[in-house]
Image (cartoon, helix red, strand yellow):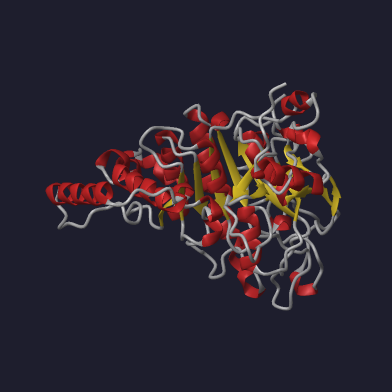
Amino acid sequence: MNMKPFTRRDVLAAGAATAGGLGLSSLGLANPSSQDAAAQLLRGKTEHVISIWLGGGMGQIDTFDPKRKGDPSKKQAGSYYESIDTAVDGVRVCEHLSQLAPLMDRVTAVRSVHHEMIDEHAAATNRMHTGRPISGTVTYPSLGSIIAHERGAAGDGAPPYVLIGYPNVTRGPGFLGARDSYLYLTDTSRGPAGLSRPDGITPQRQSRRERFLATLQRNGDPTAEQRLLDYDAAIRQSLELSGPSFNRVFQLDREPADLRSRYGGEFGQRCLLSRRLVERGVRFIEVSHNLNFLNGAGWDVHNAGILQQHKLIQEMDTAVSTLILDLEEKKLLDKTLIVITSEFGRPPEFDSGGGRGHQGTAFSCILAGGGLAHRGAWGETDELSKKIVSDPVSVPDFFATICAAAQVDYRKNLYAGDRPVPITDRGEPIAALLPA
């Protein structure tokens, strides 16, 4: 038998798998039934992901996992609002989610997500973007960059990953490099940062600059350094995207006025833009909801910040319900997975100012569309949404569910140099939500 010799990477991958209890068989190195294991890999039919980020910490007990009504004045733990029925029997949501309630048959509120990060926003935000704790030696890629890396853009002349919000390292490509980073914008009225030419740069001047850049690249010393090659690829993509063809996607005034009105304010316009980006071929879009606070505190509802929390919930309800129906009307909902996440949830108890603290041990994340087998809710918490009672879902499991839906192999390794890094930190997807 003629066998290919193992490389150092093969040996490292095998060692990492064995240390994790997977053994050589799961790598297909020593078990002839490895093809059967590969056949069991769950795979959905999602082509695009719209990830909505609620910075600050959405309280599950006040939104998608309501419990008995509490009373902050009496320090009686419980929900801040009344709950209402939905399209799914036995599944109730907060009264301020009145437009999403009849659409919950297209939605699954995963009520049993948990992590053990310290109750601090930056660390938890990193956890919910990269799927793993911060490391002192490796900068891990975000979920958006992972999906961009694995699947690329869904259409020609489109970037694979667009961020509608402020850039930072937790949303970035980490060790994957610049090629898998994002194009970003912070204002839907302006378009992406860096793609709009200053008024003084005529097409002729732009053409001369591009010729000069090409000359420099042609005459420079060749390199095999991947970081430099990735930067060159990023430059080429930015030049391709700076033209009028791609920039038309940001012209929201091309949409009917009544549809723009139904989406609502700036957050709603971001959701509308995300639909246009899906149509243009962008694979992954993150939409931030923490830039247009209506209560002075956003989703971080300590103390008096909770008094106007209902306005945030209503704004999310309006925008997300319109996005679902808009995608559905355009026959895109089954191809587009909408994900709603936050760094942690909120405890049922009220703090001294009547608001809520942080809770990462049990909270809700939302999945909608994407061709999943939705059921309104998955997982169960106790009578106050404080402890998980059934079907716990770790952050790696939640990421694996998204990856499986988006046709990404959630069991493979990425590589930080020669170091194998499990793509979802060995998460396993929620099998019941994926199509048979």
362 or 70, nearer to the observer: 362
Residue 90 image position (x, y, % from top left): 79, 39
* Residue 168, placed above or below residue 93: below
Q: Quadrant of the C terminus?
A: top right
Please name the residue shown 61% across and 36% down the image: 408
Residue 195 image position (x, y, % from top left): 30, 51
Please name the residue shown 61% across and 42% down the image: 100
Residue at the extreme top of the image, as rendered:
1
Q: Quadrant of the N terminus?
A: top right
Query: Horizontal placement of 148 versus 343: left or right?
Result: left
326 or 370, nearer to the observer: 370
The answer to which quarter of the image holds residue 240 is: top left
Query: Horizontal placement of 416 versus 22: left or right?
Result: left
Residue 288 image position (x, y, % from top left): 51, 55
* Residue 360, placed above or below residue 398: below
Residue at the extreme front of the image, as rendered:
2
Please name the residue shown 46% across and 43% down the image: 274
Please name the residue shown 51% across and 55% down the image: 172
Residue 59 image position (x, y, % from top left): 69, 59
Q: Is residue 99 visible?
A: no
Q: Can residue 381 be seen in this view?
A: yes
313 or 198, nearer to the observer: 198
The answer to which quarter of the image holds residue 62 is: bottom right
- Report the label total: 0
